[in-house]
Image (cartoon, grey):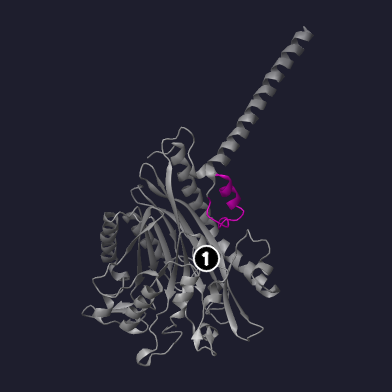
Amino acid sequence: MIKKQVDSVDRSRSRAETFILVLALAMIAGIVVVVCAFGVNFIAGTANPVGDSSPASSSDALNPGRNAAVTLDSQATISVTGDVIGHMSMVKAAYDADTDSYDFNNIFTYIQKYTASSDYSIANLETTLRGTEDGGKYRGYPLFNTPDAIADALKNAKFDMLLTSNNHCYDTGGRGITRTVEVLDKAGLDHIGTVLTENDKRYIVKDVNGIKIGMMCYTFETGEKKGGSKSINGILMKPEDAALIDSFNYNRLDDFYGELSERITAMKNEGADATVLFIHWGEEYKTERSRIQKNMAQSICDLGIDVIVGGHPHVLQPVELLTAGDGSHKTVCLYSTGNAVSNQRKESAKIKTGHTEDGCLFSVTFNKYSDGRVIVADTHLLPTWVNLFTDADTGKKVYRIVPLDKSVEDWKSAFQLNDVSLKNAEESYRRTVSITGKGMTQVQAYCRGQAKAIVSGSDAQ
């Protein structure tokens, strides 16, 4: 009797232990499934929320299994950085008295590797190229006029397109608008935001690796007089000049959305597979998006834009994944790219936190599949910081964009930093992660998950 009781207890214990073992194995298998679903690069990204040193392109994410019906046909990555501002101290630093010429190339020494690796790279030109004809002079803040050599340097740094619609695009009047376009054309740089004539096309549909990306660029107006005269940055524009700038009025946003809708249709009629809006908006020196930015972004998402990239605040702002009101569409939005390069230093800027020294190279990867679908398959944000130092040989200031790439083990030697500048670079990285990290993690998870679902056949099209 006692033995039967013991045997019964042993059998019950054995069944319980077996159940626990099976349950444990099931839990482990579940964890493996979750890891596989999100991908190794995403899991690593939680420790480095702004992303890896290059956009994820692991073979399991981009190539289908043997029995998958949908295959990846092509892939295109575009990258955009923030404001390239022509402060006078930067102009003076670029001047060579021996040749009476300007050279801005050393600004982009370290970032060029990253812009070159992208399929199409973009920057915001926060100045005009008015030249010195007819008594013109090179000037910095508040009315910018920068030597043409800045366009050559950007071209040499492997940028493909410049954004020209911003609050400083009218600093040197109508001639500043048209000559800037002429200089960029001569340099072989694409551009959107301002045009030579009112009848010129106001957007670009660019074929990048077989994917047609429709892009447009707008800036905010600062007011309007009776009779319809507009102003940019407080400067009243002639009607014929205003017609050359893509701009919007905060007080007439319905008109803006209507125009955007028409242009989206026009771009799609030209074969655009995806759409991107570059927009100058928001409040300067605010690291959080404003209420109006958030509301505008949602309305633009509702129109079907795939990606929104903002500028103007001169500091980085968050990244967000937006969902259209009817649930049919999602939009990736970076509210502000910050400064690419400027003289806005924490010692002299309006804010003393160093945020105006911070920027990024924001990359978006589009995938095109055999069934014709094009999606935002990945995003990546490379933090950047501007190192300002004095050259020991020439005694001149040097402005240099430093890519804060975590895959580079020794920033100090790789980017010629001293102890102080290394500390500042590390602080810049932390600032950028604190602003953009959470949003980037969310966006990357969605985009990479969507790409995996398509090639595995598990998506609900």
Return the x and y of residue 85 as percentages of the image width and height.
47, 77
The outermost residue toward the top is: 1
Total labels drawn: 1
- Near-viewer residue (367 or 289): 367
> Which residue is at a point 74% across and 16% down the rendered structure image?
10
Give the residues in magenta. Answer: 39-56
Which residue in the structure is indicated by mark 1? 360
Q: Is residue 53 magenta?
A: yes
- Per the picture, the main secondary structure of the magenta-coloured stretch is loop
183 or 348, nearer to the observer: 183
Local packing at callout 1 (Cα closer than 10 Å; few below 14, some 14-19, many 20+) is: many
Residue 321 locus on image (x, y percent): 44, 54
Indicate whether residue 209 is drawn in magenta: no
Q: Is residue 56 visible?
A: yes
Q: Residue furthest bottom?
A: 135
| Residue at figure coordinates x 63%, y 69% from the top left | 425
